[in-house]
Amino acid sequence: MAVVGPSRHSRVSMSVSMSLMQGTAGPTAGGQQGGLHAAQPYYHPQHAAAPAHTQEQVQPDRPIGYGAFGVVWAVTDPRDGRRVALKKLPNVFASLVSSKRVFRELKMLCFFKHENVLSALDILQPPHLDFFQEIYVITELLQSDLHKIIVSHQPLSSDHIKVFLYQILRGLKYLHSARILHRDIKPGNLLVNSNCVLKICDFGLARVEEPDSSKHMTQEVVTQYYRAPEILMGAKHYTAAVDVWSVGCIFGELLGRRILFQAQNPVQQLELITELLGTPSLDDMKYACEGAKTHMLRRAPKPPSLSAFYTLSSQATHEVVHLLCQMLVFDPDKRISVVDALAHPYLDEGRLRYHSCMCKCCYTTASGMRQYTSEFETTAPQGFDDHWEKKLTSVQHVKEEMHKFIAEQLNTSRVPLCINPQSAAFKSFASSTVAHPSELPPSPHQWD
Ligand SMILES: [Zn+2]
């Protein structure tokens, strides 16, 4: 970043402990058009708005998580002192596949506008195209996630479970309406703040649904414990129903406070599922590959033991089990959709609680009356378009398009941000390029 002159010093001295600093007001300005700098408003300490900017009051930047594809840090936005999450999308240009995947995730984060889906608040100003290697996205910072809550000792009441499940389904309805399959719904990807507001995150494995059932889709998706039986059985094509299966597993986990199907490998995973649901009929396995079908038919048939759901928790009422049994259905065609699940009476209380005091779509008038929105579970105004992906044929091409895309996103009234190389956290931040190995979904089982 070719920022010169006294402004640089003032910037560095103000933000020496912060990973972020304010950049120049144009994403391609650095190094490209030297004359542009003079026209930009430089950042001066005396213009710093809030006293929270002083070092004593600023919380240190720290890593908070490792997604399937990227490292997330809690940092302070120097423009307003607000704590935000900074995600580094690593190895962006390692291959055409990885660069397209990152571009897709970036576009999705900028596309989303929903209270229960994490979206991009900002993207850091990239350097000149020749030096463009990494992408950093800023999102809202949420203190916890459902995994941390489930393994903690804090009590989870029926009301908690209802409002969490409601928000997961509400976010998923929006995603599915945009034709997006998340493909990695698990407790760790469901962020929760101190008010129990939940947001679906990590779109590193998300993609647009494939309408052509003859087209093969990758099976290297979904953390094994939450993986739908059709994927475990090698289905070449699958639908949004894979996300519903994952939600069913999480619903069971919220009730029992332990992973519902916790197996060592995909074959054992399938074993645990059939112990509960019984051996599927041939028709229920219509999407399975031949090898997996043969494996299943060779085993002694098992009867379903759905009554086991009642032993999960004292909170497992008839209503709970009724909904759970419709989510955990072997055949994806018979599994309940997100829209139908939201219409289940079990979700009524969660909906009421959410819209009474947690949402941003309803409001309370001065006289204390609650004004409810006309649409409790909104859909996306249009589907997420992925046709651009097919036109990208080289890493360099993706790089140019991504650089252009980020420049368009930065075209706002806010001063853009960039990474502060003088910050204490910069070194470890810059070196954290590899995804956490245990977080990567294991490879699918080879049935044939
Ligand atoms: Zn509302």
Image (tube, grey):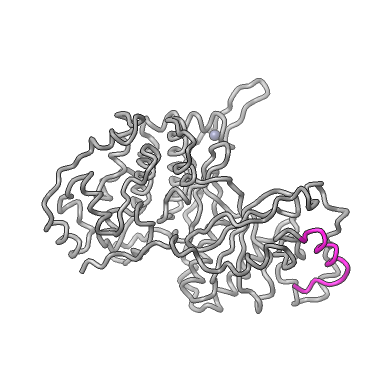
Going by the image, does 95 lie left or right of 64? left
In this figure, what is the number of numbered marks?
0
Q: Residue furthest top?
A: 367
- Rendered residue at 58%/74% (across/down): 399
Q: Residue furthest front?
A: 153
Ligand 1: give its quadrant: top right
- Rendered residue at 70%/61% (across/down): 19
Q: Is residue 306 above or below residue 403?
A: above
In the rendered image, residue 267, in percent from the top left (x then y), is placed at: 25, 59
In the rendered image, residue 312, in percent from the top left (x then y), is placed at: 32, 36
Residue nearest the observer in this picture, 115 or 231: 231
Quadrant including the N terminus = bottom right
- Rendered residue at 39%/44% (across/down): 250
In the rendered image, residue 159, in percent from the top left (x then y), is placed at: 45, 30
- The quadrant where residue 431 appears: bottom right
Q: Is residue 356 above or below residue 38?
A: above
Going by the image, does 364 lie left or right of 79? left
- The quadrant where residue 107 appears: bottom right
- Rendered residue at 32%/67% (across/down): 216
In the rendered image, residue 155, in percent from the top left (x then y), is placed at: 47, 33
Q: Is residue 436 above or below residue 148?
A: below
Going by the image, does 208 lie left or right of 303? right
- The quadrant where residue 252 appears: top left
Quadrant including the C terminus = bottom left
Residue 306 sits inside the magenta stretch = no
Residue 2 sits inside the magenta stretch = yes
Point out the stretch of residues depicted in magenta.
Answer: 1-16
